[in-house]
């Protein structure tokens, strides 16, 4: 039997504000406004034979926090790479930051649950 591949997920959340400056943005969204964001990071890989897990969830959480802490309670437009902070760009920004820190990263999803919106970026 070939080695089984697992997918594991760790959720995160943060609060942040943003605005949209493009000409066709709804007037309401041209003003600074905030959201409660949540998301999920997905990793894929084989279980480590000596431990039985793909990666320690505690270590995953610490790595995710090191990236998310930059976003928490911030104005996203002021963060390098998020000058146009659409949900898709936010998912991409988080993915690119985590991709160099987390082996096996395959997906980042970011949600604005109160709006019923989410964006996902995958390898």
Image (spheres, rainbow, N blue to C red):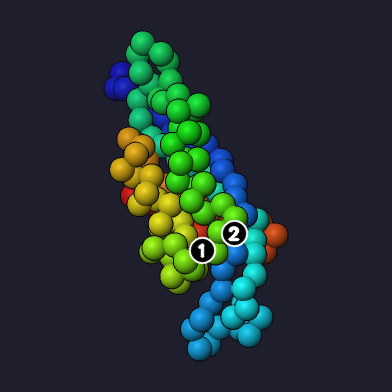
Q: What residue is pinned by disc 1?
A: 76
**Residue 105: % across, % down:** 37, 41
**Residue 106: % across, % down:** 38, 44
122, above or below 85, in the image: above
Q: What residue is pinned by disc 2?
A: 16
28, above or below 36, in the image: below
Give whichever of discs 1 and 2 has the lower sequence position.
2
What residue is rendered at 56% in x and 83% in y? Answer: 25
**Residue 37: % across, % down:** 60, 54
For the residues marked 1 and 2, what is the alpha-carbon distance in whole angstroms?
Answer: 7 Å
What residue is rendered at 44% in x and 36% in y? Answer: 63
* Quadrant where the N terminus is found in the figure: top left
What residue is rendered at 35% in x and 30% in y? Answer: 45
Look at the numbered disc 2 and give the secondary structure of its residue.
strand
Of residues 101 and 80, the one drawn nearer to the viewer in this rendering: 80
Q: Residue furthest right?
A: 114
Q: Residue furthest bottom?
A: 23
Look at the numbered disc 1 and give the secondary structure of its residue.
helix
- Circle 1/circle 2 CB separation < 8 Å: yes
Q: Is there any visible trace of residue 116 in the rendered image? A: no
Q: Is residue 40 left or right of residue 43?
A: right
Of residues 110 and 70, the one drawn nearer to the viewer in this rendering: 70
């Amino acid at each position: 039997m070939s080695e089984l591949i697992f997918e594991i997920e760790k959720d995160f959340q943060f609060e942040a504000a943003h605005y949209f400056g493009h000409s066709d943005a709804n007037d309401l969204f041209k003003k600074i406004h905030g959201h409660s964001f949540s998301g999920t990071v997905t990793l894929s890989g084989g279980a480590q034979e000596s431990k039985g897990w793909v990666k320690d969830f505690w270590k995953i959480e610490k790595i995710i926090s090191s990236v998310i802490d930059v976003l928490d309670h911030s104005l996203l437009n002021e963060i390098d790479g998020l000058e146009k902070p659409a949900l898709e760009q936010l998912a991409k920004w988080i993915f690119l930051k985590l991709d160099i820190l987390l082996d096996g990263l395959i997906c980042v999803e970011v949600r604005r649950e109160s709006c019923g919106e989410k964006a996902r970026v995958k390898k």
